[in-house]
Amino acid sequence: MSRRALRRLRGEQRGQEPLGPGALQFGFRDDDDAEEEGPKRGPGGRRPRSPGKEGVRVNNRFELINIEDLEEGPVVNGERSDGLRTEAVVSGSKRKSQSGSAEPRKDGEVDDRTGPLEQSNVSGKLRKKKKKQKNKKSSTGETSENGLEDIDRILERIEDSSGPHHPSPPPLSSRKHVLYVEHRPRQRQRVYPKCTWLTTPKSTWPRYAKPGLSMRLLESKKGLSCFAFEHSEEYQQTQHKFLAAVESMEPNNIVVLLQTSPYHVDSLLQLSDACRFQDDQEMARDLVERALYSMECAFHPLFSLTSGTCRLDYRRPENRSFYLALYKQMSFLEKRGCPRTALEYCKLILSLEPDEDPLCMLLLVDHLALRARDYEYLIRLFQEWEAHRNLSQLPNFAFSVPLAYFLLSQQADLPEQELSSAREKASLLVRQALIMFPGVLMPLLECCSVRPDAAVACHPFFGPNSEISQPPALSQLVSLYLGRSHFLWKEPAIMSWLEENVREVLQAVDAGDPAVEECENRRKVLYQRAPRNIHRHVVLSEIKEAVAALPPDVTTQSVMGFDPLPPSDTIYSYTRPERLSPVSHGNTIALFFRSLLPSYTMEVGELTWPLLATGSTGPFRCDCPEPALPAAGAPSLPRKLAWLPMGQNTPQSAGLLDPTLVAWPC
């Protein structure tokens, strides 16, 4: 074996061979000033030793680092740079000093045991390093385990001290607002300018540029903040073009408008309805989400979606688009099987103007709460608002609240006392509902495909006379509720519970209970005529039974898809400019020759957007050249329009001005 290999095994380096009689000697000092004073050398290159200390004769001066400096020295890669050699040398010197076996040597004397000592030092260094690392790992593991044990002990003590605990509702003072909207935070989208709550922007959308839509704070009083959307001059011009496109009765004109203004809200909502009528649900939902994103980017910094204290006046046309976009998004979520998220959207719409409730969300919130199995929220809403809103006078609340109590009594995780109390409350409320609205029972059983008992079917209280005698406004509310929520009553347990209470109601009617006559008088007084917000809700719901029950004065009005049944006290911030008609301001001779043409009509000058459908079967005929076709990827609609009379199962929210004709894409 070569000398180089032997030196590597011994841990030596070149130049570390034993020196002669003039070998250097180094000693340890306990003084902290040793480093500051510097090495003092005597004659012959020796360093004087401290009195009472045994010197250690070594071959490598870099092994003589002080142990205090080693502990405070830098750490490299999780290890101290020069710890092994120092520990070995110091431990060896301590053993020598304690045992007293080392004797003072004379100058020039050579220690023959230098080689074996170095080998033992090298082997001892590795062993001590491994032991030290193991001790560190075990100590950290023990501390973490001890910490976890302490936490477990604390939790056990808390559970033992509290005993068996059943969850109870928090006090009313600590509860959140009844219209507080629950939300889940989303991660910020880096590609888009801001984080949004209502929708997630998609990469397929056009690049967002401010379309001229903004929001301002009108006033703040009594803890409520009133906001309003605003349109810039550029956005107003786009709005005028949109109204002209709607009057043209051609959806493709809206497609052309969206190429120049891809985030115009009303155009997106109107085109979404056109896509939905063609069963293109994906495109319709995408357009509604883009409209919501455009409006959310215009929010005021103080506008909050979740606090329940921000208000938007529905009388302002700029605010109505936000209401309608939220409603359409809520409808899509419900159809997709997301009733809990749809419930939060419903609470958001209701919180924007809870007193007026322009879209009448109280006719829908109970249905979504039952579908989302949030029975506690429905019961709490009924308890807090019954005093000042008389929710029990609405058929949907009169039947949904007892159903919520009954479903709550079927849960096994509640105490027996609460279950029995919920069951009694449910039976009491459903009997009151059957007495107040007897015309609901037979249509409900028919929708659930349940054949009623002969005693019930032949009784005059629940017979056909109960449906005929109720006012038209009440019939509309009943049709709306049954068309939307009848399937919630199909469970066998619910039907048997309903049957028991129906028999008790019949016994009370036969016994001459005065509550029966009182409820009959209230029905005749309270339900003479439905307000406009209920008609607006029926139009948006598109439930056939409820739409068929609309009064004639509503069906003969123009129903716009982007603004159904606007309020009579609308607050306009700007008006549409009057367009000059060539009939009154043209040349008389030219007008005479134009009137001889077969395609001449008086309304020709009011159509600023040419029809794309050449040769359509409608009342207008367009011979002008077609504008550019939509770009690739834009939604394309059929160019042929069929004209159908109103009332033949056509949507009333088609967005047309003529109430007797509906443009239905075929």
Image: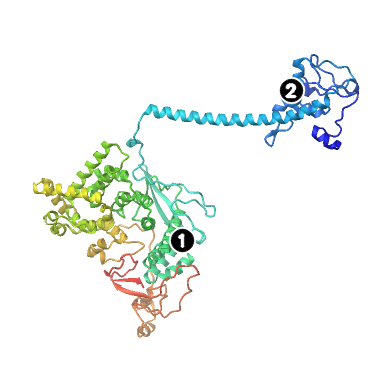
Q: How is the image coloured?
A: rainbow
Q: Compared with residue 141, is residue 265 higher up or lower down, i.e. above or below?
A: below
- In the rendered image of this protein, does residue 250 appear above or below residue 72? below
Q: CA distance from mark 1 to mark 2?
A: 79 Å
Label at residue 91: 2
Q: Nearer the viewer, residue 402 or 629?
A: 402
Q: Could you tell me residue 251's position as x and y percent?
A: 40, 70
| Residue 591 falls in image quadrant | bottom left
Q: Nearer the viewer, residue 231 or 321?
A: 321
Residue 643, given in percent of the width and then of the height, sits at 32, 74
**At x 47% / y 59%, what residue is drawn?**
211
Task: Return the disc, 1 or 2, that comes first in the chain's sequence.
Answer: 2
* Residue identified by numbered label 1: 263
Q: Residue at x 38, y 53 (%)?
A: 338
Residue 83 visible in the shown view: no
Give the residue type at disc 1: Tyr
Along the viewing direction, whichever of 569 and 616 lies nearer the viewer: 616
Q: Is residue 217 left or right of residue 355?
A: right
Residue 209, label in figure: none
Front-most of residues 543 and 127:
127
> In which image quadrant can residue 655 be found?
bottom left
At 59% across and 31% down in the image, what residue appears? 140
**For the residues bearing labels 1 and 2, Cβ distance under 8 angstroms:** no
Q: Position of residue 89 (x, y in %)?
A: 76, 25
- Where does residue 634 sit, x and y in percent of width and height? 47, 67
Look at the image and tell me whether residue 182 can be seen: yes
Quarter of the rendering occupied by the N terminus: top right
